[in-house]
Amino acid sequence: MKVIPCPSPNFNARKLPISMLVLHYTGMESGQAAIERLCDPAAQVSAHYVVEEDGTILNLVAEDQRAWHAGVSAWNGVRDVNSASIGIEIVNGGHDFGLPDFPAVQIEAVIALCQDILSRHAIHPLDVVGHSDIAPSRKTDPGEKFPWARLAAQGIGLFPEGGASEDILEEAALAQRLSTIGYDVSAAGAFSDLICAVQRRYTPADLSGQAGPHLCAMIGALSAQR
Ligand SMILES: [Zn+2]
């Protein structure tokens, strides 16, 4: 795996040990525009890595420093997600630019980079997350086209079968399981936004915001892994 240095000035010191991996899409018109923004001191945003559409991997911020990618977010009780995570920006136009497919060569590079990071840091599989998982009422990236199941098959995060019929769970029972997984169920915002974030990742064909039996079974299987 080849990693090209592309230093960004946008970082400061971590206040927490690394325990999470956060995946994003850039959501801009081009990779070049995104990289320029992630390196612009005025923008005050960054990530540790950028993965371009052709599979090129850029390193913007050293892993032992705190990059600025998560914004207002929370996961598994951590509110300073930037201090606790490594952030990867995946070049993709996102919802504002037609939600293009992720090229296979780009996903191969994301998989290699994630495997490398996970081999060097103690990150629980449930703590490999998307931006939409940690800021469900605010963010939709890396989006419903991101192949989470494929990553899980390569040891990056979890993607339970779900399968077996579980009854539809009441909101309180769902909230309890989602909290165990890591979702911030106390955040302001509609419960349906939270369910939609879970659907975006695990049942991308159904973004209704209503958890059916299949999603309830997946949520139960995930919560059992914490
Ligand atoms: Zn993001």
Image (cartoon, rainbow, N blue to C red):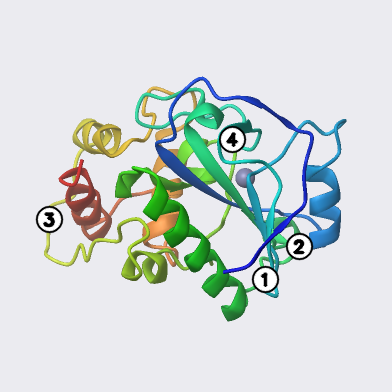
At label 2, the amino acid type is: Phe
Secondary structure type for disc 1: loop
Tell me the quadrant of ligand 1: top right
Mark 4 or 1, nearer chain start = 4
- Residue under numbered circle 2: 97
The crowding category of the residue bearing disc 2, from other C-alpha atoms within 10 Å (few below 14, some 14 to 19, many at least 20), is few
Mark 2 or 4, nearer chain start = 4
The residue positioned 46% from the left and 32% from the top of the image is: 190
- Residue under numbered circle 4: 70
At label 4, the amino acid type is: Ala
Look at the numbered disc 4 and say if its residue's Cβ is closer than 8 Å to ligand 1: yes
Q: CA distance from mark 1 to mark 2?
A: 7 Å
Label ID, residue 166:
3
At label 3, the amino acid type is: Glu
Residue 80 is situated, as x and y percent measured from the top left of the image, at: 51, 23
Q: Is residue 179 above or below residue 37?
A: above
Q: CA distance from mark 4 to mark 3?
A: 33 Å
Q: CA distance from mark 3 to mark 2?
A: 37 Å
Secondary structure type for disc 2: helix
The residue positioned 60% from the left and 79% from the top of the image is: 105
* Eye-nearest disc, 4 or 3: 4
